[in-house]
Amino acid sequence: MKLIRRRIWIGLARSCLKGNGYSVYSKCGKRGGVLEDRYAVVSDIHCDSKQAFFGAFDGHGEAGAAEFAAARLEKNIMKEVVKRGDEMEEAVKEGYLAPDSGFLNKDICGGTGCVTALVHEGDLVVSNTGDCRAVMSHGGVAEALTTDHRPSLDEEMKRIENLGGYVDCCRGVWRVHRSLAVSNQEAVDIVRDVCIGMDQAERLPAC
């Protein structure tokens, strides 16, 4: 018998959420207007209180992409975890790539970066796209767990150019095709080929 009970919270508006050992807060930035960011919290995966998924989605150009990813990404990742067993990093990477095909088949505008944390069997797998960041406090000192995907980085610039794209400096900010200031996003229309879905996942043991 498959155990499927789990607790799910998808943030669709300006909000505050407190749970057992975690909290979420989101609001509009200084520009005001519509909040395009979303979050997802899935606890008690497979009825196990030690398995959980957390995600923050930085939407832009409308909230559709962030909303889509918040609702779908955890399901795709867990499907890959079941397939791949201990290959957690690869499972998360494949889970990140899977939503793109479904997104592109829908009439949704905009794009999203994101950062996620998967707690699974004592491990913590942290992943990101775009400039969303994960930071951990260790002995009161902040430790970065992810690296921003920015086109100003030599490695990212070379990868983009090798794929036929270009990077340009616009008003002091390096952008892909004079549009995006981050180079690794979920489903971006005009620069889709050079803004790949995901290429970084780090596994931290003994969580």
Image (tube, grey):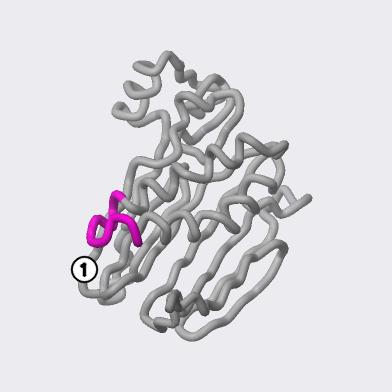
Give the side of residue 19 with respect to residue 14, left or right: left
The relative height of residue 85 versus residue 113 in the rendered view (above or below) is below
Hey, which quadrant is residue 161 in on the image?
A: top left
Extreme residue in the top direction: 164
The relative height of residue 5 versus residue 182 in the rendered view (above or below) is below
User: Where residue 202 sits: x, y (%)?
Assistant: 28, 55
Magenta stretch in the rendered image: 82-90
The residue closer to the viewer here, 180 or 141, is 180
- Which quarter of the figure is the N terminus placed in? bottom left
Could you classify mark 1 by the number of other residues whose Cα lies within 10 Å: few (under 14), some (14-19), or many (20 or more)?
few
The relative height of residue 28 versus residue 99 in the rendered view (above or below) is below
User: Where residue 57 sits: x, y (%)?
Assistant: 56, 54
User: Where residue 148 sits: x, y (%)?
Assistant: 39, 44
The relative height of residue 112 versus residue 134 in the rendered view (above or below) is above
Give the side of residue 40 with respect to residue 156, left or right: right
The residue closer to the viewer here, 63 or 79, is 79
Hey, which quadrant is residue 37 in on the image?
A: bottom right
Q: Quickly name the residue at label 1.
A: 205
User: SS class of the residue under badge 1?
Assistant: loop
- Which quarter of the figure is the C terminus placed in? bottom left
Amino acid type of the residue that numbered disc 1 sits on in the rendered structure:
Pro
Magenta span: predominant SS is: helix
- Residue at 25% x, 59% y is 203
The residue closer to the viewer here, 161 or 10, is 10
- Residue at 44% x, 75% y is 2
Q: Does the magenta stretch include residue 85?
A: yes
